Amino acid sequence: MLWEVLSVARDIGRVQDIASVLIRYGFGSFVRVLGMGRLLEGAGKVLHWQHVEEYVTLDTPQRIRRVLEELGPTFIKLGQVLATRVDLFPPPYTAEFEKLQDQAPPVPFEELLGQLEEDLGEPVDDLFLAVDRQPLAAASIAQVHKAILKDGTPVILKIRRPDLRRIIEADLRLLQRIVEIAESESPELRRFRPKEIVRQFTQSLRRELDFAAECRNAERIAANLAGNPHIKIPKVYWQWTGERLNVQEYIEGIPGRDLAAAENAGLDRKVLADHGARAVIKMIMEDGFFHADPHPGNVFYMPNNQLAFIDFGMVGRITEDRRDQVVSLLYGMVNHAPAQVAEILEDWSDNMNINEQMLIVEIEAFVDQYSSLALKDLSLTVMMTDLMALLRDHNLILPSDLALLIKAYITLDGLGRHLNPEFNTLVFAAPYLHSLMMDRYRPEAIGKRGWRNLVSILDLISSLPKDLRKLLHATRKGAFQIEINVRRLEHYANVFDVAISRLTMGIVTAALIIGSSIIMTVEGGPEMFGLPAFGFLGYTFAAIAGFWLLLSIWHSGRNR
């Protein structure tokens, strides 16, 4: 208990905020599961929570989204990461997570000025002809102001909110503590991989706090798309860009959600959809480095049906081996090879308790459902949604890079259909998939894989004597051990110990009552209050023991 209190003492106010919001939205049982109430009591805090009746009308996904919104920037970003985990959460949840708008009241420019000039290294007036004091956009992490360089070039200043890292690090500490409690106290939550999600989220959020990293992402994608005249990536002004400040070219275009303005400007929505899809699919299938959130809010439409992508804080990476696995998965689905599909899905998951035969049967039914349809009639979103539902039914969890890849495809499909209702992502992806499949079986590709495998085998053989020598040496020293880790064994041992203690106390209490009753019938000897002293003391100790036993049972019932 002391360790728990000390671990949250510095963030106790934030713990109270989180618990209060959870209870207000009807998640009081979750608070108890996490043990947050005990932590607060141990820290000496007394909470006063009230239920608000109107929240009862919201369904569970809506209430979770509202909780994340109220808890602020860290939890809004967490919701945006959860929206990418279509393998963990069904569509009603991911749809609500996608509604999380990263908006916040703007910080007065005067409060940003000191930090801004510190990052620039010079007074603002010495570098810019003008800086718009009113932000173009204000989000939880940063806000954007338009400025004009001395040569007349318009730029944007993306400025991180002051003191943000300290606040976010405090929330990340609490999230880590929450998932530790959740996994220990609630086994049913483990299937959602809370530790893995928080680890992925922590890495993503810390990268997003570094605006220089975002600019490096933008430049890498710009280099990969340098030969595509239809795609525009903003130029970075590195002389003023750093961790807390991003200075980029100002994009003069039509926001991606304003379709009416695009049509009024004479732009062809179908051509825009084609250009955007080809660019994103190339990022994924050829470059292995892609914009992971290509929704209309991150796109501008420009003259000559050109598109500009912005906001490269969330990017995905896919290795060559992983890409080959994805191609094999799609190939197995198209060519009716359910065993191949099941094998790949099992390789991706670390769940060993899989009913493989049932999985193959369900994958075969899934493949049959789509194999009879023409490519133009397939919906990537529907197909991926059905596949993710199948994975959830079998507790198969995708690696985080693949979850981000699938999310990017689904978001791209949404962008394409936003521009052109007849858009089909699979039609555009098919040539790339066919080319990649053909490349896998070219003689030079087969030779390259064979050489890699041969080198791995030779490395294994050459290191085998050394590994055997280490094993024998450890055995002779008695250092060779086999450890069997039974989950929650310590918990059950404690429960068994408590049960034995209560049983012993019950037997002792019964013996005291019986012995005292016998003594009461014996005449003579010392007395207390007119009763045999030993009988009176026996009843007294029996009453105390019985009261302790009842109190212990009642207390453990409340904890459960």
Image (spheres, rainbow, N blue to C red):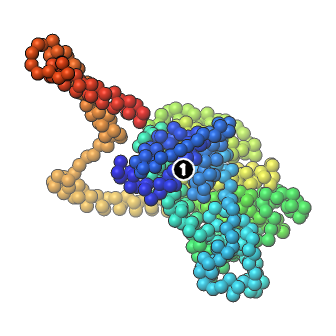
The correct choice, above or below, for 382 with respect to 230 in the image is above
Point 33% across, 38% down: residue: 491
Say if 218 sits above or below 364 in the image: below
Q: Is residue 187 visible?
A: yes
Residue 499, percent across and down?
29, 30
User: Secondary structure beneath disc 1?
Assistant: helix
Name the residue rendered at 57%, 34% in the picture: 362
Q: Residue 524 at what x, y percent from top left?
A: 9, 15
Q: Residue at x 22, y 19 (%)?
A: 513
Q: Residue at x 20, y 21 (%)?
A: 529
Q: In which quadrant of the rendered view does residue 382 lie? A: top right
Residue 161 or 101: which is nearer the viewer? 161
Task: Tell me, yes or no, if residue 346 can be seen here.
Answer: no
Q: Which residue is mark 1?
A: 18
Quarter residue 158 falls in: bottom right
Is 273 placed left or right of 491 in the picture? Answer: right
Camera-side residue: 26 or 254?
26
Q: Residues within 10 Å of mark 1 (few under 14, many from 20)?
A: many
Q: What amino acid is at disc 1?
A: Ile
